[in-house]
Amino acid sequence: MKEELFNDEYFMKQAFVEAQKAFDKEEIPVGAVVVANNTIVARAHNLTETLNDVTAHAEMQVITAATNTIGSKYLNECTMFITLEPCVMCAGALFWAQLRKLVYGASDLKRGYTKCPIPLLHPKTKVITGIMAHESELLLQDFFRKKR
Amino acid sequence: MKEELFNDEYFMKQAFVEAQKAFDKEEIPVGAVVVANNTIVARAHNLTETLNDVTAHAEMQVITAATNTIGSKYLNECTMFITLEPCVMCAGALFWAQLRKLVYGASDLKRGYTKCPIPLLHPKTKVITGIMAHESELLLQDFFRKKR
């Protein structure tokens, strides 16, 4: 059986490339891409330090960029790949965006949206977790080790 | 006893002026100002339709604008006045901003952050509610009546 060419791992690698860009800028290394019809329509990484803006998480930027590209306010035909579990702010944004599918890598045990006991995402959003979780965690650990 | 000149009502009126600007643009009428040392450092209103961006809530924009003005990523010396109770996304952003004090007008029974059973704001954020709630509700009702 031939493996699908554009699978979740393929696009998560692209999100990971974004996380590495954040790392190189001394930003907490989190990266994201948004995909529609097997095509990347937006890519972004965390820029909270560079932009001096707590709202500049990779997810927030990639939502704005993707909706700009596709010309719709809603991402109900899109998948977002993100190297780390979204926080409450970003999950709230994904709710408004009516995202079709969310794929994330590492879990965020402290600030991840799944700590909230009520569902924060849109009821139609499908969620896949753990893709390249180990690599994403290692990159985050590397970052925080350097900072100490 | 002389009433304080710059009280919560004073600044909420300015947030309400912003909400009216949103109304005039056929945006859901929500407005916000951020205040530091009795001075307005940023003002914004909902622009989700104009910008075609679900993240363009008044709160998100006023956080970005305020941190730009004051040159700090954190709003731990600031008060935000907002005509409507923030949603989960905006409450998550206010957590990251470490807002000192939040004053909101009308409650949002459907999408307000207080529907969440765990605290979403920063533990240090003081919250005042109900300031000009009636006026803000009427403006929202007017808007949705026009849309029908």
Image (spheres, coloured by chain):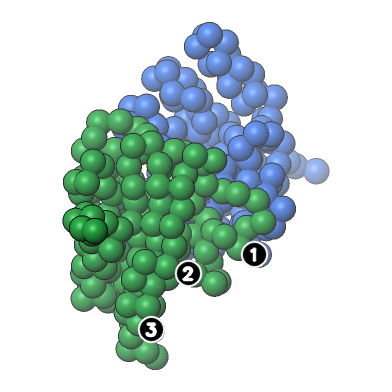
Chain colours: A blue, B green
Reading the image, the residue beneath label 2 is B107
The answer to whether residue A71 of the structure is visible from this angle is no
Between disc 2 and disc 3, whose residue precedes?
Answer: 2
Label 2 – label 1 distance at C-alpha: 26 Å
Determine crowd level at label 2: few under 14, some 14-19, many 20+ residues with C-alpha closer than 10 A. Answer: many
Q: Which residue is located at x 32 percent, y 77 percent?
A: B135
Q: What secondary structure is found at the residue carrying circle 3?
A: helix
Reading the image, the residue beneath label 1 is A124
**Image quadrant containing the N terminus of chain B:** bottom left
User: Relative to the observer, which residue lies in front, B51 or B88?
Assistant: B88
Q: Is residue B88 left or right of residue B83?
A: right
Q: Which residue is located at x 42 percent, y 68 percent?
A: B130
Q: Is residue A133 above or below residue B40?
A: above
Q: Is residue A122 above or below residue A135?
A: below
Q: What secondary structure is found at the residue carrying circle 2?
A: loop
Query: What amino acid does circle 1 point to?
Result: Lys
Query: What amino acid does circle 3 point to?
Result: Gln
